[in-house]
Image: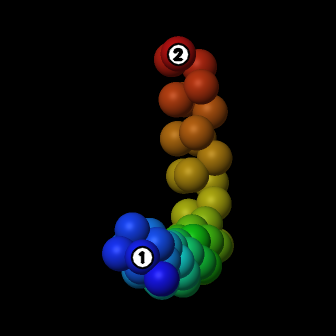
């Protein structure tokens, strides 16, 4: 195996692991976000709805 091939495979391995880690973090973030959003929306569904409608009206 040449040095170039070795370097490319090494970079590929690193990028794969980084991508996997980022993917895991993203999944955790999105699930946490949706959980928090659900929790908050149950507490203040009316407030959220009015806030969203006001934002869309003002555009």
* Residue name at image x 53 percent, y 16 percent: 59
Q: Position of residue 18 (x, y in %)?
A: 43, 77
* Residue name at image x 46 percent, y 72 percent: 5
Front of the two marks 1 and 2: 1
Q: CA distance from mark 1 to mark 2?
A: 58 Å
Residue 10 appears in the picture as rendered: yes
Crowd rating for badge 2 (residues with CA inside 10 Å; few <14, some 14–19, many 20+): few
Residue nearest the viewer, comparing 53 with 17: 17
Q: Position of residue 41 (x, y in %)?
A: 61, 66
| First reached walking from the N terminus: tag 1 or tag 2 | 1
Q: Position of residue 30 (x, y in %)?
A: 57, 71
Cβ atoms at labels 1 and 2 below 8 Å apart: no
What element does badge 2 sit on?
loop
Which residue occupies the extreme top position in the image? 59
Seen in the picture, residue 56 relative to 37 is either above or below; the reply is above
Q: Position of residue 32 (x, y in %)?
A: 53, 80
* Residue name at image x 63 percent, y 60 percent: 45
Residue 2, numbered label? 1
Residue 59, numbered label? 2
């Amino acid at each position: 195996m040449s040095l170039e091939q070795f370097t490319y495979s090494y970079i590929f391995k690193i990028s794969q692991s980084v991508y996997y880690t980022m993917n895991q973090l993203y999944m955790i973030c999105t699930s946490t976000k949706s959980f928090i959003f659900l929790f908050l929306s149950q507490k203040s569904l009316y407030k959220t709805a009015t806030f969203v409608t006001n934002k869309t009206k003002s555009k």
